[in-house]
Amino acid sequence: MESHIPVLNKNRVIAEEKEKLKRVIKAGLNNDYNKVFSTPEGVRVLNDILEMTHLFKISYSLDGSNQSDFREGERNIGLKLVKKMSSVNNATLFKAFKINLKQEYS
């Protein structure tokens, strides 16, 4: 049974290294989101994506088709992007919301 201990330790070390690498990649990706969407152009693109995903609109469709399901799927992508941006840069997200809400209610 003692002969398995080095193998288990090796597997644990490999698993820990994989987790470290995932954290580094995630941190780098968060930095990329921040760089891209912090620019004025990035805020406009973020706003456009949120608009395309119907984030600020009702996804229900009266026509009885699967349109509601399709729109809800699009909306879910917008929600995931909002969640990502809220963990990266709230100021950028608020700018995009402000632009979108101005367009909706003007």
Image (spheres, grey):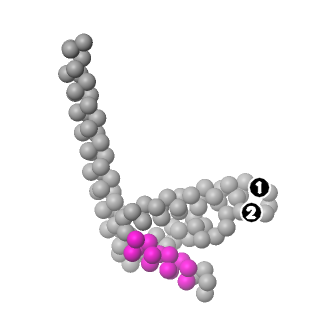
According to the picture, the residue beneath numbered tag 2 turns out to be: 61
Please tell me whether residue 71 is drawn above or below residue 3 in the rendered image. below
> Would you say residue 76 sits in the magenta stretch?
no
Bin the neighbour count of mark 1 within 10 Å (Cα to Cα): few under 14, some 14-19, many 20 and up: few
Is residue 68 visible in the rendered image? The answer is yes
Q: Residue at x 31, y 46 (%)?
A: 22
The quadrant of the picture occupied by the C terminus is bottom right
| Residue 100 drawn at (x, y percent) | 54, 77
> Would you say residue 91 sits in the magenta stretch?
yes
State the residue lying farthest toward the bottom.
106
According to the picture, the residue beneath numbered tag 1 turns out to be: 65
Circles 2 and 1: CB atoms closer than 8 Å: yes
Check disc 2 and give the amino acid type: Ser
Bin the neighbour count of mark 2 within 10 Å (Cα to Cα): few under 14, some 14-19, many 20 and up: few
Which is nearer the eye, 51 or 97?
97
Q: Quadrant of residue 11?
A: top left
* Dot 2: element: loop
Q: Quadrant of residue 95?
A: bottom left
Which is nearer the eye, 64 or 41?
64
| Residue 64 drawn at (x, y percent) | 80, 57
| Residue 59 drawn at (x, y percent) | 67, 63
Q: Residue at x 56, y 79 (%)?
A: 101
Q: Main secondary structure of the magenta part?
A: helix
| Residue 20 drawn at (x, y percent) | 26, 44
For the magenta stretch, what is the residue range?
Answer: 90-102
Query: In the rendering, which numbered label is found on residue 104?
Result: none
Check disc 1 and give the amino acid type: Ser
